[in-house]
Amino acid sequence: MAALTKDKVFIVVAAVLVLASAGLFGSLIVQHAQTSAHPSVAGVLADSPYVATAPEAPPIKTENWAAPVSQSRGRDWIYDTFTPPEIFYNARSKQFTVKPPSSLVDEDQLEAFGLDLISVRPEPFRLQLIGYAGGDQSGQGIFQNVLSGQTYLAAAGRKFPELGLSVKSFDVVQQTISAGESMSTKQRVATAVIHDEKSQRDVTLTHRDRVFTGTLFAFVAPAGETVAREVRVGDSFKLGEATFKIEKILLKPISIEVIKTSATLSQPDLRTLTPRDADDVEIANP
């Protein structure tokens, strides 16, 4: 009897839930029908015939890409999306050079640079020991003034006021000389210690080796000409209406960096020059 009563309670509760759900969904349907209903609009026919019209095109904003600019390596190094430069490798100088795309070269870049590199050389110390005369104690060195080409016979204590140099010591001693893979030999080698009054340092010279300062200089010539001139870093000179300034001199690879300016150029032209064929080139006096 208790079980029947419990079942009746469940049935009554279920019936109440069904009726409540039906009433809720019914009210929602009625509200949706009321909100979605729109008054019907009667169509009106025009008296004039139909004429097709095209809508105006929306405004379109266009921008042109900026022209490609030269890279830091020089004016010829110009890259565009579909027009890279032609790149060449010089096995002698171990350096890359380029030919810019013709479509991107302006009138400034079509102008010939007008200068050629002939050679790069290390600067020798201004006094060299090229030989000796006499024995160990009474020997004298044979010195050469690199600037003038004049030679001197001198021992310790000799001064060269025109060069700002003096000989502190000079001797000739036996030294072991290695000749590549062959056997070593004993040879007499002249050695001089030179005091440099300009730099306030001592420089050791021997008659077997040429001594250099560590500075580089170069010989350049106008394009197509055979007379070369000596230049160093920082030097500026004019050729015609153009001015050239030496920015760098390199021994490995052999090359120089030069800036050209002139009234016909809109901006300075930086080039890296490698040696041309130096046959029949005459070195001009500085």
Image (tube, grey):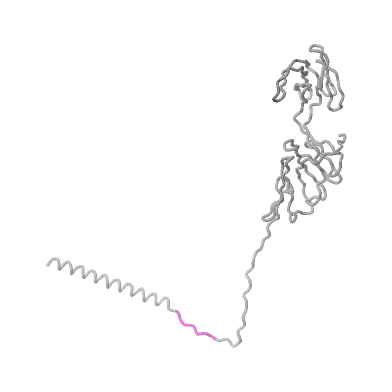
Could you say which is closer to the camera, residue 109 or residue 161? 109
| Name of the residue lying farthest toward the left | 1
Q: Locate residue 154 relative to residue 69 in the image: left or right.
A: right
| Name of the residue lying farthest toward the top | 137
Q: Position of residue 182 (x, y in %)?
A: 71, 23
The structure residue drawn at horizontal position 30% and vertical position 73%, both measured from the top left corner, is 22
The structure residue drawn at horizontal position 77% and vertical position 21%, both measured from the top left corner, is 206
Taking 215 as reference, is 48 above or below it? below
As for residue 42 lying within the magenta part, the answer is yes
Q: Position of residue 29 (x, y in %)?
A: 36, 75
Q: Main secondary structure of the magenta part?
A: loop
Magenta range: 38-44
The structure residue drawn at horizontal position 87% and vertical position 36%, both measured from the top left corner, is 284
Could you say which is closer to the camera, residue 87 or residue 17? 87
Position of the N terminus by quadrant: bottom left
Counting every numbered tag in the picture gives 0
| Name of the residue lying farthest toward the front | 182
Q: Position of residue 91 (x, y in %)?
A: 72, 41
Position of the C terminus by quadrant: top right
Can you tell which quarter of the image residue 132 is in?
A: top right
As for residue 217 lying within the magenta part, the answer is no
